[in-house]
Image: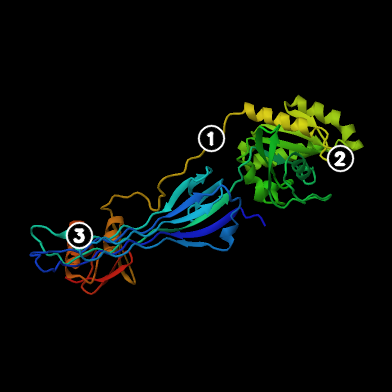
Amino acid sequence: MFYDQAKIYVRSGDGGDGCVAFRREKYVPHGGPSGGDGGKGGDVVLVVNPHLNTLYRFSRKRHFKAEQGAHGRNKNQTGAEGADLEVEIPPGTVVRDADSGELLADLTEPEQRFVVVRGGQGGRGNARFASSTNQAPRMAERGALGEERWLMLELKLLADVGLVGLPNAGKSTLLAVVSAARPKIAAYPFTTLQPNLGVVVLDDYASMVWADIPGLIEGASQGIGLGHEFLRHVERTRLLVHLLDGSGQDPLEAFDTINAELAAFDEVLAAKPQIVAFNKMDTPDAQALWPLVRDALTARGYKVMSLSGLTRQGTRELVYQVAQHLAELPAPEDTPAKETPVLRPDLDEGHFTIRRDEAGWHVQGERIERIAGRTRWDLYEALGRFQRVLERMGISQALEEAGVQVGDTVFIGETELEWNE
């Protein structure tokens, strides 16, 4: 089965906690605080592996977590950083946030890397809080929590040429003739159930990639048939070879049907250059219809060629025509990956909100939630520092003006506190 979509969960590593320690060694007077910082948590990095061509591995494994940072230690020893977790994906993978649908990255180049969630920073040890007025601090920070998110991965095949047409038009046969690909071929519609890629080599010096897209039918852009699942793979192609079934009842109507579905799915697809290939010239019906179809489409401005995939008549001429047309087209533009994913809206560092419900008071704010999450509640000096932060940011005053009472529960992010004067 061809896997071209996947939903995965990624989480970066938490930062290590800072250490509270003092240097006590013989012949070392006034050793002082020596608690080291915690190590940074590992990132989760998407890496393009050119040897992959599907998202199959994500059908079995959906959760990816990076390593946590180690805690700081005595003698100013910083904890080890958590190892980054590299997740390999095939070229042509589009990465979106599963909740918002925001485009995060479009990864097409081999070995291209994208940090999708960053590890939490390590907490500071007590050596970092020493000052002239507090020479023996007994406080440290917890490491910051890692980031987490659900991602939608969508694979769009990277091909120079896309073969489109109604079912049973002969796309798989043509691909098998011009390349070493061996797609399933049979005399009934919807034989091809997944896209197939083939490398077409021209006179041993030039090559191009052709993609056989499963047959489209009317209504494919709305999800009818198989086309809706695979139309996305046509988006990256530079040129379309529109294959017409010469033995069909009305090839011109079939031509208009496919182009209408391409335009309904994405107007950019309908604007892509096309070479029309009139197939099955080995049949009497196709030979009779060929002049009519050729004249009608030539009048519309299309390049029209006749061929037979069965007898290979005209296939070499088509390959040369496609190669010539590709050489005249501009080089494809790469979409660079974003360097930093946006997890939260940009807010003023001092911004906070207060609301009340049956559970208690809820304080929300980027900065105060981060500080609360990194406070060591088992250390008395850390509690005093947090209280001073509340006062400097105006949160204590805001809560009092809102009517907080002694004994009320106050939630700051994931932290639950009891209000006390």
Q: For mark 3, does the 10 Å Cα neighbourhood hold few (<14), some (14 to 19), or many (20 or more) residues?
A: some
Per the image, the residue denoted by label 3 is 389
Q: Nearer the viewer, mark 3 or mark 1?
A: 1
Mark 1 or 2: the one toward you: 1
The numbered mark, 2 or 3, whose residue comes first in the sequence reads 2
How much space separates mark 1 and mark 2, taking CA atoms?
Answer: 38 Å
Residue nearest the viewer, comparing 397 with 106:
106
Determine whether, in the image, residue 356 is placed left or right of residue 102: left
Residue pointed to by mark 2: 247
Work out whether residue 101 can be spotted: no
Provide the secondary structure element on which disc 3 rests: helix
Q: Are marks 2 and 3 in contact (CB under 8 Å)?
A: no
Name which quarter of the figure residue 70 lies in: bottom left
Q: Amino acid at mark 2?
A: Ser
- Residue, far right: 284
| Residue 132 x, y percent position in the rendering | 8, 57
How packed mark 2 is, by other alpha carbons closer than 10 Å (few <14, some 14-19, many 20 or more), is: many
Residue 164: image location, x then y, percent: 72, 41
Residue 371 visible, this angle: yes
Residue found 81% across the figure and 26% down from its top: 295
Q: Which mark is residue 333?
A: 1
Circle 1 packing at 10 Å, graded few (<14), some (14-19), many (20+), is few
Circle 3: residue type: Val
Measure the alpha-carbon separation of dots 2 and 3: 79 Å
Is 313 situated above or below 73?
above
